[in-house]
Amino acid sequence: MAREKNRGGRERLGFLGRIVAYRLQSNVYALLALSVLTGVFILLYLDSSKSSGFSANLWLAISTSLMASVLVLAAETFVKFRQHQNDLFLEGISKLGISNLHFDRAGLLNELLESCDRAFWAVGYRHILTRSLVQQVEAVADRGVSIRLLIVPPWTESFRLVYGGHERVADNYVAIFNAMVHGRGSASMDDIEVRFVNQPLFNDTYKVDDKIVTGPYMHNRDRDHGKITANQFFTYELHRSSRLHEMVLGEFETLWDMAEQKLDWSQYISTMEKLRVEDLNEAGRLELLSAACVPVRGSVPAVDAADDALRA
């Protein structure tokens, strides 16, 4: 069976091979037969058109009907061909573990958080998107949902390598933390935990109950500062039973266990008051946030990159 290569170098079936693979042979045979019959009746009409009799009108009516059938069958075959290609694409991404692709991550999370009643996890560098969802975060905290927030803070090397020292993110953290505190009110904060990890992240990941929403970063130069920055491109939902779901979940749990610091809520609540009444710059805010952190007991120590290089 003839094969051709696309621009990406991947082998794919040729046109005739795809016709066979998509089981459209009967459509093609019928299309050829109808086309031949149409041609025959057109010739009969042309041969008898001089007489302008009954036979000429009959051949004209038959050829016209056949032409219409040819056009309808050709359109139907083309639609089936394209639909089958779409089905193969959807089957392929489903095998990868992706249940759906999205370009509006905020809208998707907003919809999922409305019915969230068990767990909400969020991973990211700057948590810009999470901050845009503070009302929903406050609502899930009020419903008693278990929350985990994993952050790469600006006082770690992993953050500086990506964003340098110009990125202002303290307001994002404060808005999110305050939303969780306000959502719980006087209730216990034991099942709401914020951890800080000095490890690089390759995607923003959100877990809402059993659904995982994630997407890769595209690393480009920042227009204002010319430094490398991470930008979101597209978002996908993962099948719960898929290998990809298991891998993303495992990545989160590994990073969570490697985090060496976490937010102490009692210290942060006093920090909230200071942040509210004092006019602080970014460095001052981050210093207060860092001071509100305590070590995570039993955390897995991160392996130094230099040690990895020596072992290699």
Image: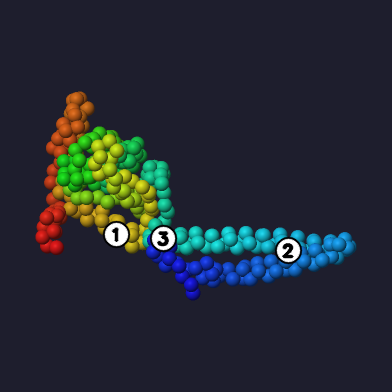
> Separation of disc 2 and disc 1 at Cα?
56 Å
Q: Can residue 8 be seen in this view?
A: yes
Residues at marks 3 and 1 touching, judged by CB atoms closer than 8 Å: no
* Residue 7, numbered label: 3
Judging by the rendered image, the residue that carries numbered circle 1 is: 247
**Residue at horizontal 13%, vertical 59%?**
309
Measured along the vertical axis of the image, is residue 36 above or below residue 8?
below
Percent of width and height locating residue 247 = 29, 59
Percent of width and height locating residue 224 = 27, 36
Model colouring? rainbow
| Mark earlier in primary sequence (2, 3) | 3
**Residue at horizontal 52%, vertical 63%?**
84
Percent of width and height locating residue 188 = 24, 41
| Mark earlier in primary sequence (3, 1) | 3
**Residue at horizontal 47%, vertical 68%?**
13
Of tags 3 and 1, the one toward the viewer is 3
Measured along the vertical axis of the image, is residue 102 above or below residue 49?
above
